[in-house]
Image: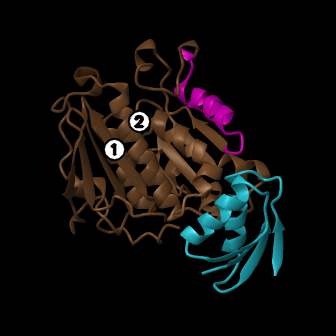
Chain colours: A cyan, B brown
Amino acid sequence: MTTLDLTGVVCPLNWVRTRLALEELDAGEEIAVRLDPGEAIESVPRSARDEGHEVTVDGTLVTIVKR
Amino acid sequence: MTLSDLELERYSRQLVLPEWSGAAQERLKAASAIVVGAGALGSPVALYLAAAGVGRIGVVDWDAVELSNLHRQPLHFTPDIGVGKAENAAVKLGALNPEIVVEPYPVELTDANAEAIVTGADVVVDCSDSFPTRYLVNEACCAQGVPLVEAGVLGFTGLVLSILPGRSACYRCAFPVEPPPGSVPSCREAGVLGATAGIVGSIQALEALKLLTGVGEALTDRILQLDCRDMSQTLVVTSRRADCPACARVPAAPQSA
């Protein structure tokens, strides 16, 4: 599984990069994203869930299974 | 075609749209648009297409900027009076978005050059201010199979129609009879507020972006009529005419995007 390090990348660019990475995946494939605490870790998982992906959050590491 | 870090940041607010995608943005970057007229409609059209990241924009206008243009043509500023509109558009759009290429065509669109100018474009946006030019642009786009966004604005009213040659009603299908000269008041006679043209031009720009990316549903076979006095909007259904001299024999254009 690919891990994308998006620490230091602010909203909404972190979500932009996450979405672009998700575009490259097939449905059911997953990606891990490392984010900053605060707005980033609160916002990106919510955006991913809003688009129907399966999301698990462990600290500042977010795993997203593409829908 | 990949997007640079600067492009991702520049376009981030549209890249986060659920309907948008990196693929849509890359399609825009690879796309070529022709804007006919850099006036009241062409200003918002050219500005929004450039800002959104359409990779190549050709701007056709042989006029120069006049003081009386400025109230409705926000591409042109007071120090630009006397400068060619196409050249000024290239300067302004280049400053707005240096990631794209803007090609000025400081020529009058005629029977002789219209098809050559629209050939190879992925979309043409007609922002001209005369009926003969509108029919000419429509015919050139039909002949070359280039998607077209038509619009007009008069007083507080406007209309918009998107055209996929060979697949949806063209401008001549919708308006088969060209108005005789003088029968419809020209812009100069009727007057217009810049903001009204801005609304209509913004709709045209949005239609062009939809056609280029495949996002949403284009305004084909429906004429959007706006009356900005009360903001009423009407969609008038139209359809292809089997005997249309402009598009009847046009083979269906490939599905855009």
Please tell me whether mark 1 sits on a helix, a strand or a loop: strand
Side (left or right) of B242 relative to B195: left
Up the image or down, B150 lies above or below B158; here it is: below
Side (left or right) of B24 relative to B98: left
> Where is residue B110 drawn, in percent x and y?
42, 40
> Where is residue B188 drawn, in percent x and y?
29, 21
Q: Do the numbered discs 1 and 2 sit on residues whose CB atoms are within 8 Å? A: yes
For disc 1, the neighbor class at 10 Å (few under 14, some 14 to 19, many from 20) is many
Count the labels in the image: 2
Residue B191 or A2: which is nearer the viewer?
Answer: A2
Q: Chain of mark 1?
A: B
Side (left or right) of B221 relative to B39: left
Query: Is residue B96 a member of the stretch shown in magenta?
Result: yes
Residue at image mark 2: B41
> What residue type is disc 2 on?
Leu
The region drawn magenta spans B80-100
Q: Is residue B115 visible?
A: no
Circle on res. B151:
1
Please tell me whether mark 2 sits on a helix, a strand or a loop: loop
